[in-house]
Amino acid sequence: MKPDVLVVGAGIVGAACAYALSRERLRVTVVDAAFAGGGTTAAGMGHIVVMDGSEAELALTAYGRSLWEELAPQLPRSCEDEACGTIWVAADEEELELVRAKARTYAAHGVPALQLDAARLAELEPNLRRGLAGGLLVPGDRVLYPPAAARWLLARARDLGAEVREGTPVERLETRSAGAVVNAAGVQAARLTPGLPIEPRKGQLVITDRHPGFVRHQLVELGYLKSAHGEAAESVAFNVQPRATGQLLIGSSREYAGLDATLNRPLRDAMLRRALEFLPGLSRLSAIRTWTGFRPATPDKLPLIGRHSSGVFVAAGHEGLGITTAPATGALLADLLLGRPPAIDPRPYDVMRFAHD
Amino acid sequence: MRRYLRHRGDRLRQVSGDPICDPAQTETLAAERLAAGRPVLRRSVGGEPRGVLCAMGVCFECRIGPEQRRACMEPVESRLSDRVAGALAEAISAVPEAPPYDLAVIGAGPAGIAAACAAAESGKRVALLDEGLAPGGQIWRGGRVPPAWRERLERSGVVSLDRATVFDLQPGFAVQAERAGEPLQLKASALVLATGARELFLPFPGWTLPNVVGVGAVQALLKAGLSFRDRRVVLAGSGPLLLPVAALLAEDGADVALVAEQSAPVDVARFARSLWRWPGKLVEAARHRLSFPAARYRPGVWVVEALGDSRVREAVLTDGERVFRERADILGVSFGLLPNTELGELIGCELEAGALRVGARQETSVPGVFAAGEPTGVGGAELAAVEGFVAGFAAAGREAPVALLRRRESLRAFSRLLASAFHPRPELRALARPDTLLCRCEDVPLSALEPSWGARQAKLAARFGMGACQGRTCGPAARFLFGWEGDSVRSPVKPASIGSLVGAHPGRAL
């Protein structure tokens, strides 16, 4: 029997869509070329973070975070969910001014955030170098392990009757194979739906051995947004995450390099040097692995969520925010697919918004 | 020969079951701790006591201290024998930021020393890097490099860099290492990979108990100054290491209770009958075999479980029909040797049957990269040295003497014989129980894994192979158990500090 919806891609976004659609009592089939959560999902940090790069980004990330909060009590230990919060670190007085502006933005959108002076920052994160100006603590942000979270979402979808077929590559999308098709193929989405403005934006991460307590919050420099939203061919930003295992995940880098997964050592080293500027003690900690991954990036840094053409929907192009916004994407997509008014304004994520250019 | 002393009763805590000797005579922290009757070096992720397993820097089970250094590779600085201490001081003071080398040789066992000498004697500027405290590799560990070789190496002008863990290679070639916690980088026009072999460990209930160690690990610990005098040792597993290690133990005064070779008696007998073609090997084998009572060598017997509390107390073995127990203070177990191919894979060398593929001049598939010894296929020290010479000559742009090439062919035939005589029996696939840990770094039990997965999926789904050893221990076991191929090799191929990765000297401004 034909499923109501065929979801292509079992990354975190496809998994969240499958879960959301299954909850609507739709018969869902999910296919993935390899295995669930093994692509971009496995390469990401798993930082659930409210980002204020734009109104639309803030709306979607805050919505996503609130849905993760609801799911949190159910998440098994393997998902390594920790509500550790984010500290946006301000290096100098100029950045502290940005912190104040950021705090006002968050307050205006009902996102709790706490300004930190230099002393309080040092108290919360004693391994940060002395002389930093302060920061902004966003206590509601969290961290989880994305591949496990993707598998968990799929398992919930399965409980509701969804079918998951791994090791099933898709050559092209045919609308007669299901009532509706959802292209959630991430960096591969444009291959299946030609014309989608999605380009791989490579990133690299380094993980350390277990050094519990070295940092306690996800630490991100204020300049991160510049790296994420800038157009530079290559950029790095200080972004260090404490894992539930006691390991530290060190990021982040961005570059356009097609789908070449080779380690870019100079860029990785620039990224590590940036991290060392903030956390000099990292120098002595043992790095056990480096990897690369591809963020599905769009020109305006916002994902494509909604209807593409008759019977074809898209949920892709989340760049670095797929983990945070996956549940919001699923909810939004289900609403759009069922013709209901969504919880947030869907227009900024309209799949066809670039079609007129 | 060795320098361990009789017990100095009042200085030592006599703990029953531990190998006791004077810790002051040991060269590595691991040997020192074992000598002092403290085999538990750390707690695993799941809280289990863990001690030394491989004793040669591969498994990362013996990590200690805030920087997670490997106890088996760390010198007991204050008590290093003069010879090793001298070599170490000299090595540390050697200036690594020298002009580019013609050749960097990685690994200073017989293959690496031979390659370095051959190239240096041909007028090339050669750096020889090794993880150990002094040149020698596993076979000549602890200052056992034969005098003639040592003198030759000293005369050759080779710059020998000990305690250097190479974690990255880049085309050109750039070599990145960590040396006593500090970054070391050098450039070389050619590479010889002489990275040796490691032991194959297969999981069985109790294999994570302290004092269950590799067979080669027993040898490494002996060579690091640990004595097993009056300790009851059971060796079990497979391959040509069992007998020489048993002989060393007997010579050391250990009570070698049993040497269990899992290969069938018929295969072992066929192997012994073929040895006449290599008279030297035959004599060696006979000498090893006669060093302890004949009844204690039992082919067709394998270990099924290790029993104990915070350390092993008993080994459970079987011949396929009868199951019996042997009391053991130390259980040495391994199922053969595996080529260390990671650095070759990192730089793009092709593999063949799990080893680096090389041509007649020991050249790999990557121009300028040569390989010699165990990484090209396990064949023992003599073959390694011959291959090393050939590689060193080739890297220096010279032809190797024909006699050397002939010798190589004869020794390779021996290595093929070894491979055909000793291979793990299928019964070993059934030893692990659902709760037996397969991945020791992350404490992943058999029950957490689906045989239909691959290595990468197991990594993401169950943290299998995600730890500090980077799958060096569990990866080959999973290949044997499930047929999984390893995940890709990436820099750093061994854990290194963040400072070493970026080449920053701690304490200096970046």
Image (cartoon, helix red, strand yellow):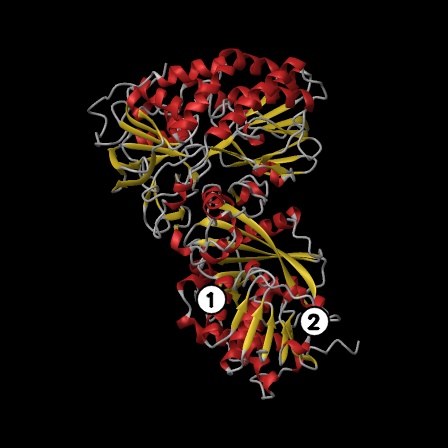
The residue marked by circle 1 belongs to what chain?
A
Residue B51 to residue B409: above or below: below
At x 32%, y 33%, the residue is B331
Relative placement, left or right, of B5 versus B448 is: left
**Residue A42 screen position, x and y as percent:** 55, 59
Q: Label 1 is placed on what type of residue? A: Gly
Residue A207 to residue B169: above or below: below
Relative placement, left or right, of B133 versus A328 is: left
**Residue B2 screen position, x and y as percent:** 36, 17
Q: Residues within 10 Å of mark 1 (few under 14, many from 20)?
A: many
Residue labelled with disc 2: A300
**Residue B52 screen position, x and y as percent:** 37, 36
- One can see residue B105 in this view: yes
Residue labelled with disc 1: A85
Q: How many marks?
A: 2
Label for residue A302? none
Q: Nearer the viewer, residue B389 or B265?
A: B265
Please identify the quarter of the rendering in which residue B367 is found: top right
- One can see residue A106 in this view: no
